[in-house]
């Protein structure tokens, strides 16, 4: 904000395959002196993953986020803390208490004062970004009383796309003098999001016909809840949601004679986050609200089973891999690099009855990318040091990205009453930044407006 004070927008971690690089990326290599607040746009790891390190470095300021994000943040940070630091209950409780003490939840659309002094006055406002539940873009108003100068800086965070299940799409801000804009898909357009529902339905039909499991690797936050929402609608329309007592006790396996297709979430974190999503239904979009009013619950329907314990997980893997009972399994993680989905893959990739369903992009170098590339050719993949032949059907369904594409990003800018004078592109590969920069320049030329588009190297 000035030479002596600043705001920190997100504090995330790069998720790659180089553990040494990952460790370096976790370190707080900037001064925290003068940081008035940390503002969290949303609770994905690449935006909050370094919060434990920031607190360890001595940051004691407020962690400001939307009200839904304040509910989700402790769940995500708790899971990450257990994986990276300690499962000791006392240590974990102290950490979560500190996070809770520093968290400040603010409503969407309301201005919140950050700093007041003779030199500068700063306030922020969070607006819905449509990426995941609670995601926000940040409007930051800076006023300098001594010169009467006012500047509005907008930080996009991760913007969502139109026609996203559960969430209303983002609306452009009124204006911005400076825009910090994500560019993840700045060089491409997504596959049609409207017809993806029919493509998902065809995949479920095939799984039923093959008498096997439809295995969907998915991240616990956002993607899992979207899938459940769409699967519930497909099963509802197919009249598959007839009364049935479905339970899975610690010492039981799945009932063999189920008359309906079970939908299984095999991820403790995904189960907790889905429960949190259900408790935040007042933030859902109009269509989702209408389903609730009609007596349906798209995140807690009759056939939905959650698998929490490792013992249950092993039972389900063994049962589904050895029988001809069709099922849908959503298991973490989305790139197949670790988590419970790996055990399903080991047990099912060699069997043609089963179907592995990727919801779009798989990062290069991950097992998911290898399965996606070589699976349709009858190739193999290495999982945890062992090689597995791929006989299962491999399908990739586009249109499920949680990010805005190139057209959506351009519309975010053109939808403003006052277009930014300067746009800085972040959160994307260099090719995506350069492609989006060219499109932005062309957009401004249609109005004969000047714009300074900055494309940083990293």
Image (spheres, rainbow, N blue to C red):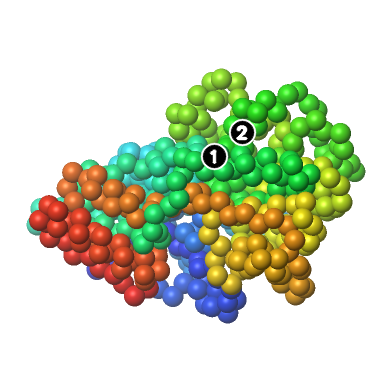
Q: Which x, y percent locates residue 165?
A: 50, 39
Judged from the image, the secondary structure of the residue bearing numbered disc 2 is helix
Residue shown at the point (70%, 48%) measured from the top left: 214
Front residue of this view, candidates 231 and 334: 231
Q: Which residue is mark 1?
A: 197
Using the image, determine if residue 106 lies above or below residue 420: above
Check if mark 2's residue and mark 1's residue have beta carbons within 8 Å. Answer: yes
Front residue of this view, candidates 437 and 237: 237
**Farthest-out residue, front:** 377
Measure how far apart labels 2 and 1 are at the Cα level.
8 Å
Can see residue 186?
yes
Using the image, determine if residue 26 lies above or below residue 82: below
**Farthest-out residue, right:** 251
Residue shown at the point (50%, 68%) measured from the top left: 14
Which of the numbered marks, if any, corresponds to residue 234? Answer: 2
Q: Quadrant of the C terminus?
A: bottom left
């Amino acid at each position: 904000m000035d030479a002596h004070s600043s705001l920190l927008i997100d504090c995330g971690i790069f998720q790659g395959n180089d553990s040494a690089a990952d460790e370096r990326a976790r370190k707080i290599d900037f001064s925290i002196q003068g940081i008035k607040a940390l503002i969290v746009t949303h609770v994905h790891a690449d935006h909050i993953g370094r919060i434990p390190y920031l607190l360890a470095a001595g940051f004691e300021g407020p962690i400001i986020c939307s009200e839904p994000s304040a509910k989700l943040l402790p769940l995500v940070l708790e899971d990450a803390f257990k994986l990276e630091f300690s499962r000791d209950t006392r240590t974990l409780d102290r950490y979560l208490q500190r996070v809770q003490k520093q968290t400040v939840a603010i409503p969407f659309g309301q201005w919140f004062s950050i700093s007041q002094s003779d030199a500068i006055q700063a306030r922020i406002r969070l607006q819905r970004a449509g990426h995941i539940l609670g995601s926000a873009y940040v409007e930051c108003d800076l006023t300098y009383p001594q010169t009467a100068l006012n500047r509005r800086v907008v930080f996009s965070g991760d913007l969502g796309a139109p026609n996203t299940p559960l969430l209303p799409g983002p609306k452009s801000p009124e204006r911005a003098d400076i825009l910090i804009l994500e560019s993840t898909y700045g060089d491409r357009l997504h596959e049609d999001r409207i017809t993806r529902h029919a493509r998902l339905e065809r995949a479920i039909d095939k799984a039923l016909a093959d008498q096997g499991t439809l295995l969907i690797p998915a991240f616990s936050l956002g993607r899992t809840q979207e899938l459940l929402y769409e699967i519930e609608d497909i099963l509802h329309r197919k009249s598959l949601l007839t009364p049935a007592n479905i339970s899975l006790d610690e010492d039981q396996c799945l009932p063999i004679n189920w008359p309906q297709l079970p939908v299984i979430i095999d991820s403790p974190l995904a189960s907790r986050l889905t429960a949190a999503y259900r408790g935040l239904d007042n933030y859902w979009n109009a269509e989702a609200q209408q389903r609730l009013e009609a007596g349906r619950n798209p995140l807690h329907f009759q056939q939905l089973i959650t698998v929490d314990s490792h013992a249950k997980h092993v039972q389900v893997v063994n049962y589904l891999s050895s029988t001809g009972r069709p099922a849908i399994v959503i298991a973490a993680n989305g790139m197949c690099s670790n988590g419970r989905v790996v055990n399903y893959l080991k047990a099912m990739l060699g069997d043609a009855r089963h179907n592995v369903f990727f919801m779009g992009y798989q990062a290069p170098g991950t097992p998911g990318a290898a399965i996606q590339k070589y699976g349709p050719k009858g190739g193999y993949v290495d999982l945890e040091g062992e090689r597995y032949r791929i006989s299962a059907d491999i399908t990739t369904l586009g249109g499920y990205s949680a990010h805005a594409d190139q057209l959506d990003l351009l519309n975010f800018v053109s939808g403003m009453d006052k277009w930014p004078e300067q746009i800085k592109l972040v959160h994307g590969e260099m090719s995506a930044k350069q492609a989006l920069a060219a499109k932005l320049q062309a957009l401004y030329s249609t109005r004969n407006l000047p714009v300074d588009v900055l494309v940083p190297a990293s």
